[in-house]
């Protein structure tokens, strides 16, 4: 059961909230939503029915998580970032049967005011810069920014920029933890046994 639900929040009957989850002012969690343990849903957050949210997810103020979105464990959604679920919306055309699934993988960060267009996957521990518009899949550990978002670097699990060259191969240490990361043929991986 959720740890704290503010008196102004609405959690519809049937919604699942894990232990230690907090729901703040004016939030609304719909009946079919599944929210994991240890999450924080900020002020004015909306969570639709067909949504799965993992454990320890932080959703900052003014974010709507619409149908067909999955957020894996440890995802961070910055203030006022936007998800979509229809690729080509028109007010006069009903397209609820055309929702495209969006997946944000474990540990990823989406910065404030960013937009994630439906149908994409944001990779594990990827980092979407503030204000970016994500229109295609983002690789694991990638740092993307801009409109439309393009990759400008690589990030560690700790959220530190890695000194790895785009388009090259190499290795780098996270400047905070000392963890070793390998980049080969466009794929970045952390080497577990190299942890400090």
Image (spheres, grey):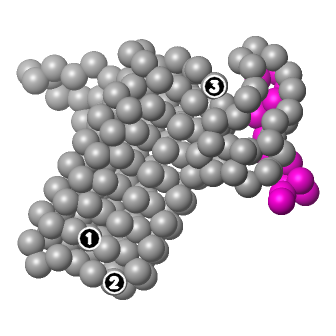
- In terms of image quadrants, where is residue 162? top right
Question: Is residue 134 something that shows in the picture?
Answer: yes
> For residue 172, which numbered disc appears in the image?
none
Residue holding disc 1 = 23
Q: Is mark 2 on a helix, strand or loop?
A: loop
Residue holding disc 3 = 153
Q: How crowded is mark 1: few (under 14 residues within 10 Å), some or many (20 or more)?
A: many
Which tag, 1 or 2, sits closer to the chain's start?
2
In the rendered structure, the answer to whether residue 72 lies left or right of residue 172 reads left
Report the magenta residues as a range.
183-196
Q: Of discs 3 and 2, which sits in the foreground?
A: 3
Residue holding disc 2 = 3
Which tag, 3 or 2, sits closer to the chain's start?
2
Residue 9 to residue 164: above or below: below
- Look at 73% across and 54% down and name the residue there: 177
Quadrant in which the N terminus appears: bottom left
- Look at 53% across and 37% down and name the residue there: 127
Q: Of discs 3 and 1, which sits in the foreground?
A: 3
Mark 3 and mark 1 residues within 8 Å of each other at the beta carbon: no
Residue 54 to residue 113: above or below: below
Which is more toward the observer, 9 or 142? 142
């Amino acid at each position: 059961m959720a740890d704290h639900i503010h008196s102004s929040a609405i959690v519809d009957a049937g919604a699942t909230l894990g232990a230690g989850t907090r729901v703040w002012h004016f939030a609304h969690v719909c009946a079919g939503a599944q929210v994991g343990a240890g999450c924080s849903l900020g002020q004015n957050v909306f969570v639709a029915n067909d949504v799965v949210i993992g454990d320890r997810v932080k959703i900052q103020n003014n974010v709507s998580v619409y149908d067909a979105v999955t957020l894996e464990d440890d995802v961070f959604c910055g203030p006022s970032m936007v998800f979509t679920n229809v690729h080509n919306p028109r007010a006069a055309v009903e397209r609820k049967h055309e929702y495209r699934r969006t997946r944000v993988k474990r540990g990823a960060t989406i910065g404030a005011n960013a937009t994630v267009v439906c149908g994409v996957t944001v990779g594990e521990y990827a980092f979407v810069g503030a204000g970016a518009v994500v229109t295609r899949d983002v690789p694991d550990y990638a740092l993307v920014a801009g409109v439309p978002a393009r990759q400008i670097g690589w990030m560690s699990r700790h959220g530190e920029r890695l000194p790895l060259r785009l388009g090259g191969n190499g290795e780098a240490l996270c400047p905070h933890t000392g963890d070793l990361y390998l980049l080969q043929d466009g794929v970045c991986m952390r080497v577990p046994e190299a942890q400090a």
